[in-house]
Every structure is written in structure tokens, then in C-alpha cells.
DNA sequence: GTCTTATCAAACCAATTGGTTTCATAGCAT
DNA sequence: ATGCTATGAAACCAATTGGTTTGATAAGAC
């Protein structure tokens, strides 16, 4: 298990089910059962995905009666986005290597 | 193994060694041995990381004598960055849920 | 030609992942 | 009280991961 925050974030995003869950939570809170509905898997499996997302800081969960609604913590995506942003200049200008960029700038 | 491109990309980025390799390649081509030097692991282990990066489209490799220099393909990060960008508005404005954002906009 | 270097490939291993099933528990409904 | 519903927890399993070691191969160096 990766101990650094960035690795945990990217690992959490490396699963289409988890990305879909985040997409659903962008519309607001949802319970485990609601989140599981679209997927061909048990609610327990979705519960495991939620735990991965929670450990990565990407969601928060609260207690409401016997329900455990999750909600998005989008700010946890910030570091990942910033890491990628350091490479944006490379592909935006069609350069894959910094040396090329420096050469053409000079 | 995830078949979708986005999952493969995020999975490739979910390892600090691989992110460091990409950082090194931002300065230009490097051989397996050069890339392995900073890490406390065998060149074979780094070779495996390179294969992961290659399958994700994040690097390209060529043959030069007995060397196999790798170079960055930054454009392969574009989709991942765009996925994250769809959430940027959430944390930029301090909102974690779209419903809040819509409510405040209205 | 022989040696050395750089790399890949394969076998192996422990730990992790992503799913299942089963059981336990908490709380609403009747 | 009794039962149903939502969820968590644990045991289990197959596949994957990230490393190792060993052996093969390809190409430059002497």
C-alpha cells in the first residue's frame, strides 16, 4: 500500500467503478445502496470501493440512521491535478521533451 | 488489468518510482540503466516499470545499439488531466457538490 | 574471437486488489 | 417485540503487482 498521498489518489482513480462513483457524487450525497445500483456487483463490493476512496480523502461519510451517505471531497484531487499540470506545457505545445522546448525557445 | 485507457494511465501514475521516472524523462531520453541509478532496486525492476509506462502510452522506446532509450510521451497525460479538470470547478470555488454550486449560482 | 555491458524474459514470491459469500449489527417499520 | 433494510466485517479466492534471481541475447570493446 502506498503511503504517499499522491500515489493513494492516483490508485483510487485507477478504477472505472470508483471514477463513476465520484461522478455520481458530484450530484450530491448518496448511500451505498444508491451508489451500487448501476453496477453489476454487490453492495459490499461498492462498500470496499468507498473505503478506498475514503482513505484517499476523496469522499467523506456520515451517519444518518442506518444509512451511510458519502459525499465528494473534490479538494483531494487538487494535488493530482497540479502534478499533471507540470506536464501540461509539454503536450500543449506539442513537445514531449523539455530539451526540445528549451531549444526552440532559445 | 484495466482495459480502458484512463485506468491504465492513472494506475501507471500511482507509483512514486514511475512518477520519478517520468520526471527524469522530462529532461530528455534516458536508458534503463540511467533511469535505474537513483533507485534502490535492480535495473530489471525498473525495466518492468518502463513496460507499465509503455503500455499506458506514457513513454516510447527505441533501439540504439544495445541500449533502449525511453522518452516521454506527455500527450498521453492529456485525458487524465481533462478528467480531473471536470472537477476543478468544485474545489476552486470551495464547493464539493455540484448542487451547492448550482444553488449559489441561481 | 572473447569479454563485458545493457537489456529482456522467465520463474518465483509475498502482498495487494477486486470480487464473492456469510454473518453481525444498527435502526426503521409494523 | 419482530422483522426487514442498510451496512460493515471477515473469510475466502483468483488475478495482479512489485520486487527478486537466474539465464539468454545482442552489440560494442579489446
Image (cartoon, coloured by chain):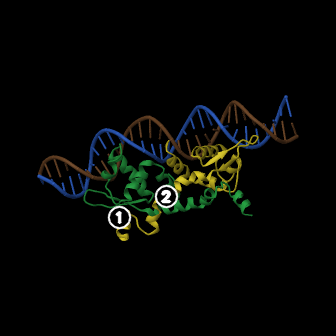
Chain colours: A green, B yellow, C blue, D brown
- Split into 4 quadrants, where in the image is the C terminus of chain A? bottom right
Q: Chain of mark 1?
A: B
Query: Where does residue D23 sit, x and y in percent of width and height?
Result: 68, 31
For residue B49, side relative to residue B95 (left or right): right
Q: Chain of mark 2?
A: B
Q: Are marks 1 and 2 on the same chain?
A: yes
Q: From what the image shows, is residue C1 above or below residue B56? A: above
Query: Viewer-proximal residue, A2 or A39?
Result: A39
Residue at 50% from the left image edge and 63% from the top image edge: A78
Q: Is there any visible trace of residue B43 in the rendered image?
A: yes
Q: Which one is earlier in the sequence, the residue at label 1 or at label 2?
A: 2
Query: Where does residue B21 sit, x and y in percent of width and height?
Result: 63, 52
CB within 8 Å, label 1 to label 2: no
* Image quadrant in which you'd find residue C12: top right
Q: Is there any visible trace of residue A4 in the rendered image?
A: no
Q: From what the image shows, is residue B61 above or below residue B78? A: above
Element type at marker 2? helix
Residue at 31% from the left image edge and 52% from the top image edge: A34
Query: Viewer-proximal residue, A91 or A20?
Result: A91
Mark 1 = which residue?
B99
Q: From what the image shows, is residue D28 above or below residue A29? A: above
Residue at 59% from the left image edge and 59% from the top image edge: A88
For residue A82, side relative to residue D28 (left or right): left
For residue B62, side relative to residue D29 (left or right): left
Query: Where does residue A58 sit, x and y in percent of width and height?
Result: 43, 59
Give the Cα distance between marks 1 and 2. 19 Å
Query: Where does residue B62 sit, x and y in percent of width and height?
Result: 70, 43
Element type at marker 1? helix
Residue at 40% from the left image edge and 64% from the top image edge: B96
Q: From what the image shows, is residue B94 above or below residue D19? A: below
Mark 2 = which residue?
B84
Few, some or many residues within 10 Å of mark 1 (<14, 14–19, 20+): some
Amino acid at each position: 500500500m502506498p503511503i504517499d498521498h499522491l500515489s493513494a489518489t492516483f490508485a483510487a482513480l485507477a478504477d472505472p467503478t470508483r471514477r463513476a462513483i465520484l461522478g455520481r457524487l458530484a450530484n450530491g450525497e448518496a448511500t451505498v445502496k444508491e451508489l451500487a445500483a448501476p453496477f453489476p456487483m454487490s453492495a459490499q463490493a461498492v462498500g470496499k470501493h468507498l473505503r478506498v476512496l475514503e482513505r484517499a480523502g476523496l469522499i467523506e461519510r456520515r451517519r444518518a440512521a442506518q444509512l451511510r451517505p458519502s459525499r465528494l471531497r473534490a479538494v483531494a484531487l487538487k494535488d493530482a491535478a497540479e502534478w499533471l499540470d507540470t506536464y501540461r506545457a509539454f503536450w500543449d505545445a506539442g513537445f514531449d521533451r523539455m530539451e526540445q522546448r528549451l531549444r526552440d525557445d532559445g
